Image (tube, helix red, strand yellow):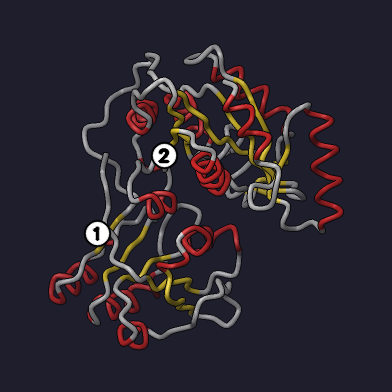
Amino acid sequence: MKTIQIKAPYLIFLGSESRQTYAKTGMGLVQWRRELCAGQLSLSETAIDLGLEPLSLQQAVDAGIQSLVIGTAFVGGGMPTQWIDILVEATSLGLDIVAGVHQRLNDIPELKRAAEKAGTELIDVRVPPEELPVGTGKKRTGKRLLMVGTDCAVGKKYTALALEKAMKAAGMNVDFRASGQTGIMIAGQGIPIDAVISDFLSGAAELLSPDNTDDHWDIIEGQGSIFHPGYSAVSLGLLMGSQPDAFIVCHEAGRKHISGWNDFALPAIKDVIERTVLLGKQTNPAIECIGVSINTSSLSPVERDDYLSQLSQRLKLPCFDPLRDGIQAVIKILTNN
């Protein structure tokens, strides 16, 4: 599996992005690798604040920062043209540039020339390995837990990382398997599933989670949603190739529509469970849902407790916020499997 190397510390570049949904790369790095993030650079006073020290490019270089990491992602995976001059300046000052968007840094001629002249690196995280296989559908050894979502950016990566941390603390044999750009930056390895040609999606998922010992769990970062009008193909390919023994549905409390597709209502959690089981049985007849992870950041503590309690009673499953509490109920289920 392809492993990337990113020089720390990082300057997180946010452009003018003010929406949390599209700044999830920067937010994820700060949440899970805060010690590597030394500053943030924004182009607007209304840009999202990650709680890092605001720095100019020159201040970042003077502070010993080595990499500028693009912390945002747009629908379609491109970059605004007005960013190019800033990135050229950054690499000319000696900073490596790291990006996980679909538009490759190395395909931008002026940026490529500037990096070659300065001796700096352009690191495209969203580049899948070459010669990926077509999926076989054959059962692999070891156990797998997949995160699935009602939508994009509802906590699939956060839930997977929180579970890995809790399972390791419980003495379990477990690995986090990254399938998206931010997860790969955090883990240092993985496969960007949404950049894989569709014929090879399930094969890539099989490589992402290879054979392992009987007591080993792979915690697989999910992508998109099988109900998503734009990204469902990626979600389905990951589901087929992961062959999960178990899955957790991830959802954000209060979200009503597919983010960015306001004509599409968010699916009910129950419907996500039923469709995931129906489709997942194709490669693993024993697939089952073992819990529901809820991003409750929009709720007060009292509202959160009521919401999770009522949801758990209705679905007959553990329902929890992975960054607050309740995850031990899932660990208990896993240790009994």
Closer to the chain start, of discs 1 and 2, is: 1
**To which quarter of the image does residue 317 belong?**
top right
Q: Secondary structure at mark 1?
A: helix
Residue 40 rendering spot, x and y as whole percentages = 46, 76
The count of marks equals 2
Pick the quarter of the image with the N terminus: top left
Residue 78 rendering spot, x and y as whole percentages = 41, 58
* 47 or 145, nearer to the observer: 145
Classify 10 Å Cα crowding around label 2: few (below 14), some (14-19), many (20 and above). Answer: many
**To which quarter of the image does residue 124 belong?**
bottom left
Q: Is residue 172 above or below residue 143?
A: below
Pick the quarter of the image with the C terminus: top right
From the viewer's perspective, tell me whether residue 120 is left or right of residue 207: left
Disc number lying in front (1 or 2): 2
- Identity of the amino acid at label 2? Arg
- Residue drawn where x is 22% and y is 37% of the image: 130
- Residue 177 got which mark? 2
- Residue drawn where x is 71% and y is 35% of the image: 267
From the viewer's perspective, tell me whether residue 234 is left or right of residue 104: right
Residue 242 rendering spot, x and y as whole percentages = 44, 26
The residues bearing labels 1 and 2 have C-alpha atoms spaced at a distance of 28 Å
Q: Is residue 278 visible?
A: yes
- Residue 107 got which mark? 1
- Identity of the amino acid at label 1? Asp
